[in-house]
Image (cartoon, rainbow, N blue to C red):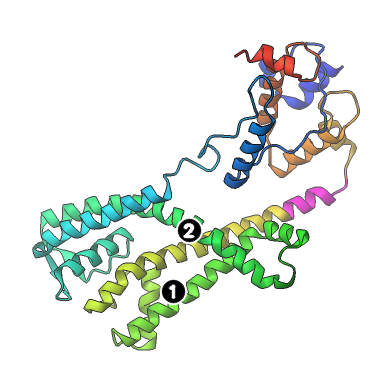
Amino acid sequence: MAENGVQQHLLHDGDRSKMPPPGRARRFRRCQTAPSHNAEQGSILLRQNMSRKGASGTFSPVPPNGLITGARPRFWLVGILLLAYLLAGTAAFYLAMDDMSGDRSGNRALDALYFCVVTMTTVGYGDIVQSSDVAKLLACVFAFAGVALVGAFLSKAADYLVEKQEALVFRAVHLNHADDPKSLRDMEANKVRYKLYTATGLLAVVLASGMAFLMKVEGMRLVDAFYCVCATVTTLGYGDRSFSSTAGRAFAAAWITVSTLVVALFFLYAAELAAERRQRELAHWVLTRRTTSMDLEAADLDGDHRVSASEFALYKLKELGKISQEEIAEFLEEFDELDVDHSGTLSSHDLAVAQPG
């Protein structure tokens, strides 16, 4: 009966090959929370596990750095690569400046740096353009390299900036009880919202600073300044309004990089918050809807006509899309391989026999 129940609820018709041997009833027991994959918590867990290791000298492993969060290069390495890109791009376009046409500021090196940044961030005003085949091919090379490099750099910079600022935003909102456990849980639950608040504030500062500079230094009207910063931060770069003075291009070299980052963050967190809201609505529906006998039948993983707390939790996780049928089958297949004494539970002896050395 247990075998039939497992076949009925764990696997699809085409997955019979993954079935455990006959007579193996499934047991689900209450367990501690799995190790967090957060970088800071992971390092704490590693130290705790090392302090708890026994005579065998083994301890519970923490996933390698980058396995969960994605294999992205270190911030300092990306920074060095970005600096190298700007130096190489500035030097290359400085030498090729005679093959370019358009509005010049009078400072050859500054124009080369300005064109490099405009190319890297895909703004492309068109106030300086290539007039020879060599310059066009050179711009193509730096365009592709710049897009890839600036994406990695901005991602790292965004992680650092937002993680630092979101705590300040939270404490500003909950100033009187920032260290209260309930408030800290609220901060974790609304993490994306605070990131959006931070990005919104930074966006307002970026737009205001750009408009103020354009009005004061470039002599633009209010509407033209607003039009120019919007065309810049969204990387449209129409080109009818741009930074033309020496001071303006020096300012633009830094401001354009920062502004495009902030706008990307704003829309990223806005989309993430909308997705999170939909997920919470789904979770509320799953948790509040009426449980039927069909639900109990589907949740009965071991086929004993009783649903344990662990089985019920797994069923709800499947409804939320947190775990799939295939993933459960793979986990249980791994359990079978580790359970060498076929007791339905795992012990240190099972692990020593199943994973020698």
Residue at position x 73%, y 57% in the image: 185
Quarter of the image that includes the C terminus: top right
In the rendered image of this protein, does residue 197 appear above or below residue 188? Answer: below
What is the x, y in percent for residue 281? 73, 55
Question: Which mark, by number, is residue 206?
Answer: 1
Under mark 1, the amino acid is Val
Secondary structure mostly taken by the magenta-highlighted segment of the chain: helix
Q: How crowded is mark 1: few (under 14 residues within 10 Å), some or many (20 or more)?
A: many
Q: Which of 67 and 349 is in front in this view?
A: 349
Question: In the rendered view, does 99 fall on the left or right side of 81?
Answer: left
Residue corresponding to mark 2: 158
Q: Is-magenta flag for residue 88?
A: no
Residue at position x 34%, y 86% in the image: 215
Q: In which quarter of the image is residue 330?
A: top right
Quarter of the image that includes the N terminus: top right
Residue at position x 40%, y 66% in the image: 258
Label 2, label 1: how many angstroms apart (C-alpha)?
15 Å
Dot 2: element: helix
